[in-house]
Image: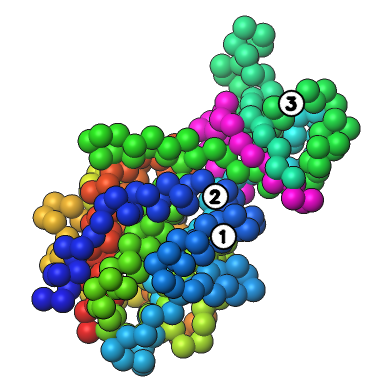
Amino acid sequence: MAIRNSLDNVDRRFVLSSFKRLLEADSPAGYYPDVHACLAQILGELGYAMEVDNKATAYVRIPGERSDGVRCIAAHLDTVGLVVRGFNDNGTLRVRGIGTISYSSIEGETCRIHCRDGRVVEGQVICDRHSVHVFADSRDIARNETNMSVSIISDVRCPDDARALGVGAGALVAIDPHPQFFDNGYIVSRHIDDKAAVAVLLDVLRILKETGSVPAHDTLFAFPMCEEIGHGGSFVPEEVREYVALDIALIGPDYEADEHHVGVITSDSHGPYDWELTNRLIRLAAENCDRGKWSQQVTYRYTTDASHAYRASHDLKASAFGMACMNTHGRERSHIDALVQTERLALAYLLEG
Ligand SMILES: [Zn+2]
């Protein structure tokens, strides 16, 4: 009954408002000050204090009914982005991707360049052969880090003009999230991966605080900063025995999912997650998610923080689930339904004994 009551407390408006606030805080992997401030602010409003470890993972500790078998439930704060590596003669910035960014999806998008001295410079991602009216091969040239640059939105004509603004090698570039929320519940935005899951966990924490519900086990809510670069969950506090990552599920020819689904990740590119824990999540999804709005997935071009934790020689079980998402690592698309189903499964997992 306690689980059922908590499931009924999911607040779509709080999830969406938290998601929007998180989107406003730039967080390409490697740059955490803004998103940490945002997360601490939201958690503070809910009555929680946030701890941060040395690799910038943020935590909230929640006492449970039992203190053995500590559980960690995680959603990552970092996003794909770019890092400045040098200059072209015309003052545009040569870049490399942070994480598996899709260059074709960011052409023309605005961005913010976070310089090492704290200055922030506005920019735009462009193809070096940028205008169909200027370059004969503009439409056909590959969109990749060889042919694409960041153009500073200012009167920059040479590398020294860019340097004068504080831009140099190592500056981190956040791509504009460009969110759109539709009346029918669809969401189109960059960084649904994984800020929508962070927003889901914030609503779980709100429910725990407001209803007095207590997780079955002591639980560590974790918000890593290095998932997109492959090692967010690789450090796990010693006491953790189960690690569940909330991260995007996929939509496409191999996936029985659409934007209304939560997907339970049974296996990722490194192989299967823990048999018992994953089966438990499947059972909980069947019992607590709406019919036809959950599915099982094998995500073979994909890993999660759970995978990082699992492979880092910790003594724990690992698995993952999350909102189904289309057009991943570009302007992604999901639906509020998928976030609600993800939260229902998270609550069921945490509250079941
Ligand atoms: Zn992710």
Region in magenta:
97-118
Amino acid on which disc 2 is placed = Ala
**Residue tagged 3:** 154
Mark nearest the camera among 3 and 1 is: 1
In the image, taking residue 184 as reference, residue 29 lies left or right, namely right
Q: CA distance from mark 3 to mark 2?
A: 23 Å
How far apart are labels 2 and 1 at the CA level?
A: 8 Å
Q: Say which quarter of the image contains residue 159.
A: top right
Which residue corresponds to the image point at 18% horizontal and 52% vertical from the top-left? Answer: 293
Where, by quadrant of the figure, is residue 281 drawn? Answer: bottom left
Q: Secondary structure at mark 2?
A: loop
Q: Looking at the image, tell me whether mark 2 or mark 1 is earlier in sequence order.
A: 2
Q: Label 1 belongs to which residue?
A: 37
SS at mark 1 in the image: helix
Q: Up-down: is 146 above or below 233?
A: above
x and y, in percent, of residue 19 in the image: 40, 50
Q: In the rendered image of this protein, does residue 2 appear above or below residue 332?
A: below
Residue 25 numbered tag? 2
Circle 3: residue type: Ser
Q: Residues within 10 Å of mark 1 (few under 14, many from 20)?
A: few
Q: Position of residue 152 (x, y in %)?
A: 72, 30
Q: CA distance from mark 3 to mark 1?
A: 28 Å
Which residue is more in the foreground, 263 or 182? 182
- Label 3 sits on a secondary structure element that is loop
Observer able to see residue 103: yes
Q: Was residue 247 drawn as part of the magenta stretch in this picture?
A: no
Q: Is residue 164 depicted above or below 21 in this figure?
A: above
